[in-house]
């Protein structure tokens, strides 16, 4: 008689008590471009990503880093502002279950999960600052012929104005965990890295100064994505030798987090940051508090 009683009790648990399905890393960044041909040259030729059709938006194009991570490029809408970011997306093992979990946490969710023609399942919500956040249960992708400069997106970044407000969603509801924080100068925090709960990839809060009005260039620096590389010198040398540095870029350097990095920009100013997986120097500002991603 105990088993039916247990099932009855489980059936009466409040929705808020249900378990969150795993969020196992970054799916993609979706950005805008006014010149889709220039975007193709940059993401396919320069970054070596695999071009494919976009099952979510027929006007867009996907550029795959690996079978489950990609850059989605969409046509620039009329009356677009300075930002070229459409949304950031994270992977989950159960899109329908995560939608139900978020609904139980009083996050506004769509009525259903969408199934795309690549077999992926997806839905989107808004974070506390109004940014679109998509969750993707991955489908399948053909990566034949790709020569990506790195094979893993290790982080994405977005403009955040209120760290505490965003933490109510990313930390308290989604259970992202602290990784590192710092700034360009001592005494001011400009970057806050929060790792996804079941993987060592992270979202980076990019914090402008209070009241700062961003230019398109500054927004492109902040709204960015990062590909992990094992050896920065080798990666940059490969890009140079193969004539894959056709757009604005900066010399490789050691960042304030102690890691080698290299910044390159598409024609709209969106930044691709190559980054080594582990520091070569002690990071400034705060300790690393979670494991590093691996190649």
Image (tube, helix red, strand yellow):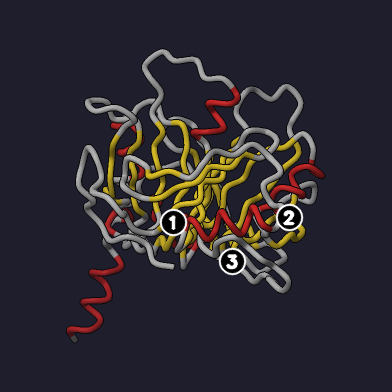
Q: Tell me if mark 3 has few (under 14), some (14-19) or many (20+) residues whose alpha carbon lies within 10 angstroms of its own.
A: some
Describe residue 265's horizontal placement relative to residue 164 as left or right.
right
> Mark 1: which secondary structure?
helix
**Quick one: quadrant of the N terminus?**
bottom left
Residue 244 badge: none
The residue at which mark 1 appears reads as: 100
**Residue at position x 39%, y 37% in the image:** 205
98 w.r.t. 84: above or below: below
Describe residue 32's horizontal placement relative to residue 134 as left or right.
right
The residue at which mark 3 appears reads as: 66
Residue at the extreme left of the image, as rendered: 2
Q: Please tell me whether mark 2 or mark 3 is closer to you in this view.
A: 2
**Residue at position x 49%, y 31% in the image:** 130
The residue at which mark 2 appears reads as: 45
Residue at the extreme right of the image, as rendered: 37
What x and y, as percent, mark residue 293? 37, 62
Specify which label sits upstream in the sequence, 3 or 1.
3
Residue 78 vs residue 148, the one in the foreground? 148
**Residue at position x 51%, y 55% in the image:** 227
Q: Please tell me whether mark 2 or mark 1 is closer to you in this view.
A: 2
Q: Tell me if mark 2 has few (under 14), some (14-19) or many (20+) residues whose alpha carbon lies within 10 angstroms of its own.
A: many
What is the quadrant of residue 271 in the picture?
top right
């Amino acid at each position: 008689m105990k088993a039916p009683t247990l099932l009855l009790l489980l059936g009466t648990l409040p929705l808020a008590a249900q378990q969150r399905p795993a969020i196992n890393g970054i799916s993609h960044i979706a950005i805008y471009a006014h010149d889709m041909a220039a975007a193709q040259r940059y993401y396919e030729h320069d970054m070596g990503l695999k071009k494919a059709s976009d099952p979510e938006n027929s006007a867009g194009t996907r550029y795959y880093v690996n079978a489950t991570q990609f850059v989605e490029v969409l046509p620039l809408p009329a009356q677009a502002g300075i930002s070229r970011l459409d949304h950031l997306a994270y992977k989950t093992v159960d899109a329908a279950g995560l939608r139900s979990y978020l609904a139980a946490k009083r996050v506004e969710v769509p009525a259903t999960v969408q199934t795309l023609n690549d077999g992926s399942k997806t839905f989107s919500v808004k974070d506390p600052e109004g940014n679109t956040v998509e969750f993707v249960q991955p489908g399948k992708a053909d990566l034949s012929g790709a020569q990506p400069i790195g094979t893993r997106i290790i982080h994405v970044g977005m403009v955040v104005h209120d760290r505490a407000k965003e933490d109510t969603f990313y930390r308290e509801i989604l259970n992202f965990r602290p990784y590192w924080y710092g700034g360009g100068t001592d005494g001011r925090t400009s970057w806050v890295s929060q790792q996804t709960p079941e993987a060592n990839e992270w979202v980076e809060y990019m914090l402008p100064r209070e009241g700062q009005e961003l230019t398109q260039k500054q927004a492109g620096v902040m709204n960015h994505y990062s590909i992990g590389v094992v050896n920065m010198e080798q990666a940059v040398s490969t890009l140079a030798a193969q004539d894959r540095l056709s757009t604005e870029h900066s010399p490789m350097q050691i960042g304030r987090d102690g890691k080698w990095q290299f910044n390159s920009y598409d024609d709209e100013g969106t930044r691709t940051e190559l980054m080594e997986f582990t520091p070569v120097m002690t990071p400034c500002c705060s300790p690393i508090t979670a494991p590093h991603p691996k190649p």
